[in-house]
Amino acid sequence: MEEVIPGIYRIFDTFVNVYIVDRGDHLVLVDTGIESTCEKIIEAVKKLGKPLKAVILTHGHMDHTGSLRCLKEVLNPIVASQEEEVEMIERNTGVKVDVKLKDGELFEGFRVLHKPGHTKGSICLLDEDSKSLFVGDLVVEENGKLKEVPHQYSMDPEMNRKRIIELLEVEFENLMPAHGNPIIGKGKEKIRELVESFNLS
């Protein structure tokens, strides 16, 4: 576990990140990684010494929901996802989604941004206080640059590209991807570079 910026912790497992966000008297988890991530998350929660109140899933793919069942059994957090992703998550994990999120609403200090393309119910989560954007699989980081998720993994790559362009309208500085390293301070700048590269392709 590493503290990326004050109050936001990253846990890396094999090829995927999950993030724990400190909300004062409790913790919130963004995504759950793969099955092996469960142990790492439980250990981090114990170390931080606060209860894990909620898990928010950016989408339903198995490298984001892999530890959900284990975490539900051990720590029993509330589970939240975008309403159109609920069916996939419940089918894949056998865990009930407690809170169905809608675009624009505020949940556990995050502004929910519905960004369908990678999947129907993909979301980004904006922590307005720290200006941090948790992007799920909307983009991935590689060697300091942002890239699109390889097209074969997205339901609709063209729609996903439109959603990336929409991020230019969002006020943020730090970008927290599920794959690759967080970009601190220059998140919006790196999105702009990626969008400019679309015009060349």
Image (cartoon, grey):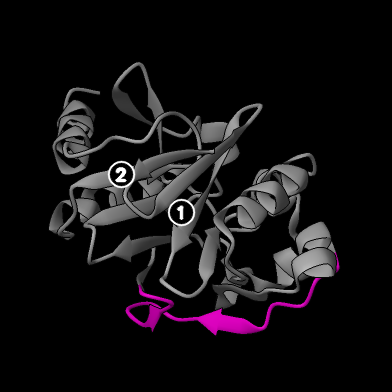
Instruction: Say few, some or many: other residues with alpha carbon within 10 Å of mark 2 (under 14 / 14 to 19 / 20 or more).
Output: many
Q: CA distance from mark 2 to mark 1?
A: 19 Å
Mark 2 residue type: Leu
| Residue at 55% in and 60% down | 29
Q: Nearer the viewer, residue 80 or 1?
A: 1
Instruction: Say few, some or many: other residues with alpha carbon within 10 Å of mark 1 (under 14 / 14 to 19 / 20 or more).
Output: many
> Closer to us: mark 2 or mark 1?
2
Q: Nearer the viewer, residue 60 or 20?
A: 20
Q: Residue tagged by mark 2?
A: 175
Helix, strand or loop at disc 2?
Answer: strand
| Residue at 38% in and 77% down | 103
Instruction: Tell me if I can see residue 137 in this picture.
Output: no
Q: Position of residue 187 (x, y in %)?
A: 22, 40
Magenta region includes residue 106:
yes
Mark 1 residue type: Gly
Q: Residue tagged by mark 1?
A: 117
Magenta region includes residue 158:
no
Q: Is residue 117 left or right of residue 171?
A: right
| Residue at 22% in and 66% down | 129
Task: Give the residues drawn in magenta, as a range.
Answer: 94-109
Quadrant containing the C terminus is: top left
**Could you say which quadrant of the image residue 94 lies in?**
bottom right
Q: Earlier in the sequence, mark 2 or mark 1?
A: 1
